[in-house]
Image (tube, rainbow, N blue to C red):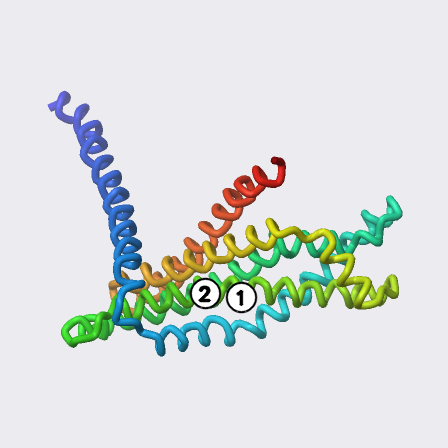
């Protein structure tokens, strides 16, 4: 009896550990299958052009107010906080270049991605989650409609297309906020501000910002669709899908930001 009681904890751990490991690999396999299915079906006919345009409208136009406010405040605050440091070296004239580089390289893509992850990602997760638990997706599978192409492919493509556009819009609005701050304190004209800003921008900066925005948009759309499309457990599952979409998308965006910064830094040093 003593031998059995001494061995039971060890046996319990050895049985439980592989179960967790197996579930993790199964989850990764499901994600891989979901992404692979998107690339197989997302670019093949028939195309859901009307639904794609509708999703672009939902993601882009309905996010303009929030992104405009955030971008304007970011440009003004960043300029105000940067001025004292530059003033110590008598280099306040560098403010337009500094703000332009910071917005285009990092702040605009990252801010747009995080805002979209919170607004768009949660919306996609909750919408598809509610359709799953109310068996609307199952009904589409019975009919002639391909639910994956209609629901998932259109939303992922719309996010991938729209987020880069919103990123450059955020940068533009942020520069407007910076200009308002600079012209009030230094009296700089619009022509001089634009000229000083564009002098420091390179083609690599535009490419890097575009690539990051495309990756962020794809991540937001894919995470939201995966969580919502595979949700369960009724209304509880809908809330969990919306919450998981935001948390996972934001985590992946920060991770992708770190990797992309290191990657494009290699081209700037060569």
Q: Residue at x 24, y 70 (%)?
A: 147
Q: Residue at x 74, y 54 (%)?
A: 199
Q: Residues within 10 Å of mark 2 (few under 14, many from 20)?
A: some
Q: Pointer 1: what residue?
A: 165
Question: Which quadrant of the view contains residue 100?
Answer: bottom right
- Quarter of image, res 242: bottom left
Pointer 1: residues within 10 angstroms few (<14), some, or many (20+)?
A: some
Q: Is residue 17 above or below residue 63?
A: above
Q: Secondary structure at mark 1?
A: helix
Q: Is residue 216 visible?
A: yes
Measuring from the top left, give residue 175's x and y in whole percent: 70, 63
Residue marked by disc 2? 161
Q: Give yes or no for contact between labels 1 and 2 (Cβ–Cβ under 8 Å).
A: yes
Circle 2: element type: helix
Image: 262 above or below 173: above
Residue at the left extreme, as displayed: 1
Q: Is residue 237 left or right of residue 175?
A: left
Residue pictured at 21% horizontal, 40% vertical? 19
In-image side of 198 versus 235 (left or right) = right
Residue at figure coordinates x 14%, y 21% from the top left: 3
* Depth check, front residue: 206 or 224: 206
Q: Is residue 80 visible in the rendered structure shown here? A: no
Q: Is residue 78 left or right of residue 222?
A: right
- For residue 121, above or below residue 81: below
Indicate the position of residue 224 as horizontal and vertical percent values: 37, 62
Residue 70: numbered disc = none
Is the N terminus in the top left, top right, bottom left or bottom right quadrant? Answer: top left
The percent position of residue 72, horizontal first and vertical second, equals 68, 67
């Amino acid at each position: 009896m003593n031998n059995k009681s001494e061995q039971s904890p060890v046996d319990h751990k050895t049985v439980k550990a592989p179960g967790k490991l197996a579930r993790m690999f199964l989850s990764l396999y499901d994600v891989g299958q979901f992404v692979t299915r998107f690339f197989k079906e997302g670019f093949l006919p028939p195309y859901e052009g009307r639904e794609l345009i509708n999703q672009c409208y939902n993601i882009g136009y309905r996010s303009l107010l929030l992104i405009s406010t955030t971008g304007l405040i970011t440009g003004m605050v960043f300029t105000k906080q940067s001025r004292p440091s530059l003033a110590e070296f008598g280099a306040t004239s560098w403010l337009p270049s500094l703000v332009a580089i910071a917005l285009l390289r990092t702040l605009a893509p990252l801010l747009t991605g995080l805002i979209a992850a919170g607004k768009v990602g949660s919306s996609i997760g909750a919408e598809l989650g509610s359709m799953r638990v109310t068996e609307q997706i199952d009904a589409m599978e019975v009919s002639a409609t391909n639910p994956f192409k209609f629901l998932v492919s259109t939303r992922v493509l719309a996010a991938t297309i729209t987020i880069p556009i919103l990123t450059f819009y955020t940068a533009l609005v942020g520069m407007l906020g910076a200009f308002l701050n600079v012209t009030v304190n230094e009296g700089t004209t619009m022509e001089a501000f634009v000229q000083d800003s564009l002098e420091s921008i390179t083609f690599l900066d535009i490419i890097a910002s575009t690539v990051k925005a495309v990756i962020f948009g794809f991540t937001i759309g894919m995470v939201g669709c995966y969580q919502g499309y595979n949700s369960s457990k009724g209304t509880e599952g809908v809330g969990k899908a919306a919450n998981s979409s935001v948390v996972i998308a934001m985590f992946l965006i920060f991770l992708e930001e770190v990797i992309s910064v290191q990657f494009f830094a290699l081209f700037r040093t060569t």
